[in-house]
Image: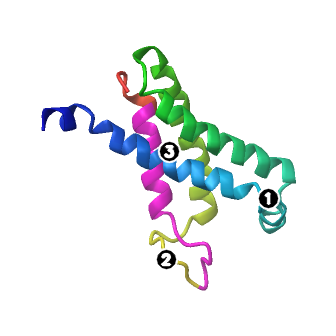
Amino acid sequence: MDILRKNALWLLRINLAAVFLYHGITKLPAAAGMASMMKVPLIIIYILALAEILAGVFIIAGGVKKEWALLSRISGATIAVIMIGAIKAHWGQWVFMATKSHPMGGIEFQVTLCLTGLYFLLKSDS
C-alpha cells in the first residue's frame, strides 16, 4: 500500500497526459475545419496541437527523473495558458454540457484542467 501512496501523483500525470495527447493528436486531421470554425489562421491550430502534445509528453517525462522536474513546470504552464484560452472561449456557462447558447459546452472541465496544470507549475517537487 505504501508504494501506491508514494506513486499516487502518477495517476494525475497519466490522466492529464492522456487528455492533452488525445486532444493534440485529434486536432491535426481536423485542423482546417477547426481554424475555419474558430476564425483563426490554420497555423494557430497546428501550434495549439503541438503545444498540447508536448504538454502531454512533458508531464510524463517530468516525473521520470528528478532532474527532469522542470518539464513538469513547463507542461503545467503550457496547460494553464491553453486552458485560459479555452475558458475564454467557453465563458458564460459553468456546466460542461452543450446547450443552444453554448454548443461547445461550458468551462467546468477547462477549469479543472487549468488548475491541475497550475498545480504542476507551482509544486516544487513535481
Residue type highlighted by circle 2:
Met
- Rendered residue at 83%/62% (across/down): 39
Q: Which residue is mark 3?
A: 17
Position of the N terminus by quadrant:
top left
> 39 or 76: which is nearer to us?
76
- Rendered residue at 53%/42% (across/down): 80
Q: Label 3, label 1: how many angstroms apart (C-alpha)?
A: 21 Å
Residue type highlighted by circle 3:
Ala
* SS of the residue under disc 3: helix
- Rendered residue at 46%/31% (across/down): 121
Q: Label 2, label 3: how many angstroms apart (C-alpha)?
A: 23 Å
The magenta span reads 100-120
Residues at marks 3 and 1 touching, judged by CB atoms closer than 8 Å: no
Q: How many marks?
A: 3
> 115 or 52: which is nearer to us?
52
State how the image is colored. Answer: rainbow
Res 117 seen here: yes
Q: Is residue 98 above or below residue 63?
A: below
Q: Which residue is mark 1?
A: 31
The main secondary structure of the magenta stretch is: helix
Residues at marks 2 and 1 touching, judged by CB atoms closer than 8 Å: no
Residue 117 lies in magenta, yes or no? yes
Q: Which residue is mark 2?
A: 97
**Label whose residue precedes the other's in the sequence (2 or 3):** 3
Tell me which corner region of the image, top left, top right, bottom left or bottom right, holds residue 38.
Answer: bottom right
Instruction: Provide residue 71's location: percent of width, then percent of height.
Output: 52, 25
* SS of the residue under disc 1: helix
**Label whose residue precedes the other's in the sequence (2 or 1):** 1
Instruction: Provide residue 52's location: percent of width, then percent of height.
Output: 63, 45
